[in-house]
């Protein structure tokens, strides 16, 4: 729900971690990746990754279909000829010639697009800029992909062991395992669910490694994924070089921006149903608070819809330990999700969509 200019480097924020941030913030806009003179662009819609017709490598896709024996070489040539003569894309040519039916063709296209992303998961150099509010032109969207699933797929094929260590705490350091509101939406494989269950009972990574039946290499891969999703609370290796929005610098402003969204939700629903809105949002906060941990046990809903946490935390937000600051961010995200859900229940899905669109412009971080 946080949708503002965000930039940094892949040396500081690995690509899967970057995707998670954009997904969690439900960003709509363009992501630019720059490495030397080369620039790659991606579009996002409400945090989901868009397959952009303008940048889709259709020639490479056609070659891949031949290599996978989906199309014989002669059919690929026929497709190229038809595309040139009719002035259409290869994808449309394949459909018009009846070479592959739509459902498998789109599945193949999405799978190909995701595989093209995999090299970026191991890339440790280059800069990125996320530019919100830059929509994809009408008719240019070929597909919309679940970003969380792509993150997991990409991490599973990483081979660089040093990269996997970058977000993990020291083995003897105490660890914190969170249960974020989106946990049930993550499509974990059986061995990943096993590792998560084991991790929840481990005091540190040393204990986890000693008990894990996966072996160290596969265990680190799962741990890296959990750290990318903020499930495993991993202190940053270099706290002074965090990208914007990742550390506790400017924490008061970050929390104030989140509270601005809470106030906007209150104003929105109050306009629709009057004073009853405060009761509805208060109930949603009460329900959310029950599983937000000790940090939020003194939380209360103010008259204007803002959420007051323990004043002791708010007055020294920029000096909080990293783990506690992250807990505050995760808690606020869950509160916002709970309030949006309350609006949906009270007013319907159309109002929910309108509210989410409006929140993208409120309290930018």
Image (cartoon, rainbow, N blue to C red):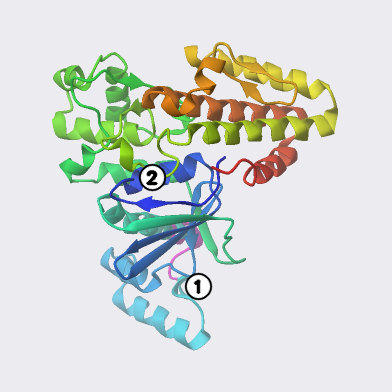
Q: Name the foreground residue: 198 vs 268.
A: 268
Q: Earlier in the sequence, mark 2 or mark 1?
A: 1
Q: Name the foreground residue: 76 vs 175.
A: 175
Query: Percent from the top left, x then y, of residue 346?
Result: 76, 28
Using residue 182 as the reference point, say whether residue 358 is left or right of it.
right
Q: Name the foreground residue: 230 vs 105.
A: 230
Asked whether the viewer can see residue 293, the reply is no
Does 99 appear above or below 184?
below
Per the rendering, the mark at residue 3 is none
Please state, as top left, top right, bottom left or bottom right, where the N terminus lies in the image.
top right
Query: Percent from the top left, x then y, of residue 289?
Result: 57, 15
Q: Residues within 10 Å of mark 2 (few under 14, many from 20)?
A: some
Residue at image mark 1: 92
| Region in magenta | 99-105
Occupied quadrant, residue 16:
top left
Total residue callouts: 2
Q: Name the foreground residue: 129 vs 224.
A: 129
Q: Residues within 10 Å of mark 1 (few under 14, many from 20)?
A: some
């Amino acid at each position: 729900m946080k949708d503002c200019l965000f930039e940094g480097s892949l040396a500081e924020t690995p690509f899967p971690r970057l995707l998670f941030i954009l997904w969690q913030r439900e960003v709509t806009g363009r992501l630019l990746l720059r490495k030397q003179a080369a620039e790659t662009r991606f579009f996002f819609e409400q945090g989901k990754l868009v397959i952009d017709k303008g940048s889709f490598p259709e020639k490479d896709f056609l070659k891949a279909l031949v290599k996978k024996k989906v199309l014989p070489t002669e059919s690929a040539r026929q497709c190229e000829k038809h595309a040139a003569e009719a002035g259409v894309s290869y994808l449309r040519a394949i459909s018009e010639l009846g070479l592959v039916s739509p459902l498998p063709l789109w599945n193949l296209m999405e799978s190909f697009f995701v595989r093209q992303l995999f090299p970026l998961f191991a890339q440790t150099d280059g800069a990125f800029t996320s530019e919100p509010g830059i929509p994809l032109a009408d008719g240019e969207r070929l597909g919309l992909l679940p970003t969380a699933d792509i993150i997991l797929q990409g991490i599973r094929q990483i081979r660089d062991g040093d990269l996997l260590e970058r977000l993990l705490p020291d083995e003897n350091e105490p660890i914190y395992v969170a249960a974020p509101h989106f946990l049930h939406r993550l499509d974990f494989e059986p061995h990943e669910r096993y590792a998560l269950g084991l991790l929840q009972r481990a005091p540190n990574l040393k204990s986890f490694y000693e008990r894990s039946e996966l072996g160290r290499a596969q265990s680190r891969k799962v741990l890296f994924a959990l750290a990318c999703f903020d499930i495993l609370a991993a202190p940053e290796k270099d706290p002074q070089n965090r990208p914007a929005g990742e550390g506790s610098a400017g924490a008061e402003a970050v929390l104030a921006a989140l509270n601005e969204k809470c106030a906007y939700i209150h104003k929105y629903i109050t306009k629709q149903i009057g004073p009853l809105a405060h009761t509805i949002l208060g109930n949603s906060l009460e329900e959310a608070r029950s599983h937000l941990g000790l940090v939020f046990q003194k939380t209360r809903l103010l008259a204007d819809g803002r959420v007051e946490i323990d004043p002791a935390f708010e007055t020294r937000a920029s000096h909080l330990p990293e783990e506690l600051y992250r807990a505050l961010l995760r808690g606020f995200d869950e509160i916002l999700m709970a309030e949006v859900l309350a609006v949906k229940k009270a007013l319907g899905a159309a109002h929910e969509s309108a509210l989410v669109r409006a929140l993208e412009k409120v309290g930018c971080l």
